[in-house]
Amino acid sequence: MTETFVPPTRFAVPGRIAVSNRAAATWQTATLTEIRRETPHAATFRFAVPHWTGHLPGQHLMLRLRAEDGYLAQRHYSIASPPDDAGHIELTLDHVEGGEVSGWFHTVAKPGDVVEVRGPLSGFFAWPGDRPALLIGAGSGVVPLMSMLRHHRARDLDVPLRLLVSARTPEELIYAREYGEETTPVFTRGAPDGVPVGRIAAAHVAPLLAEQPPGGWEAYVCGSNGFAEHASRLLVEAGQPVDRIRIERFG
């Protein structure tokens, strides 16, 4: 019988970004100001949150949607925006079939609508920008990783950052227009001419572990349960220390 490999996680050190635990416990009003289509099934929703006190890249929040009859629905969503986007947060949501909250956002929501948010939450997956970061994500699992990438660019950080991102096809690659030389996209169903099709593999991970920056990588993996286990196993097989792998998983 083969045991499932589940790397442990550690709590991040906040570093130079201050986050208020008191504010994280308080529900705040968030007003939808913009909707941007990312892929046929995913969109980014930008909110004005005047009293938002900041977050660490990689953190998430709790969102509460209140219906006219008083019914409440709550969901956890990763934050896509960087910490320096004062007074605003962005969430990128897949349109999940049968999902009441994602369905509302994709079919009903419009600028001016109001929801409630509470956060930021969790520190184990946070990256304050103080160490080299190797990011691996699939599908909407790239959302918290994009907060890290945007933070890296916004502050022009010197620490190395690399991103491996997996999508079914180029059309389904979230944030496709934002990636640069730090990013390697991998396509599992269809790819441009000359680009191989397949899962993230040892051939993608091993070269990054072979030429490590001083101090080594801090690895962040986000995606479905199956993807998280696959990617973390590749990291360990390539020599990444287990205690330097942080995982955010869903599904």
Image (tube, rainbow, N blue to C red):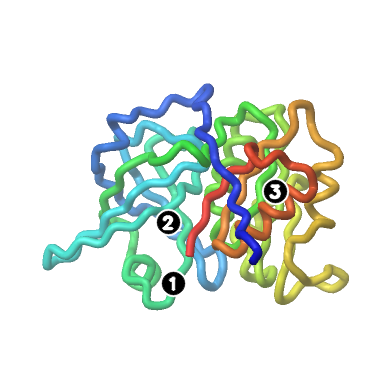
Q: Compared to 146, does 45 lie above or below? A: below
| Mark 3 and mark 1 residues within 8 Å of each other at the beta carbon | no
Q: Which mark is residue 96?
A: 1
Secondary structure of residue under mark 2: strand
In the rendered image, the residue lying farthest to the top is 16
Secondary structure of residue under mark 1: loop
In the image: residue 204, left or right of residue 176? right
Residue 138 position in % (x across, y down): 62, 60
The residue positioned 49% from the left and 60% from the top of the image is 250
- Circle 3 residue: 163
Residue 198 position in % (x across, y down): 76, 70
Q: What distance separates the C-alpha of mark 1 from that of mark 2?
A: 15 Å
Q: Which mark is residue 45?
A: 2
Q: Compared to 9, does 188 lie above or below? A: below
Q: Compared to 100, does 228 lie above or below? A: above
| Mark 1 and mark 2 residues within 8 Å of each other at the beta carbon | no
- Front: mark 1 or 2: 1
1 or 2: tag closer to the N-terminus: 2
In the image: residue 46, left or right of residue 39? left
Secondary structure of residue under mark 3: strand
Q: Amino acid at mark 3?
A: Leu
Q: Quadrant of the N terminus?
A: bottom right
Residue 126 position in % (x across, y down): 52, 37
In the image: residue 165, left or right of residue 36? right
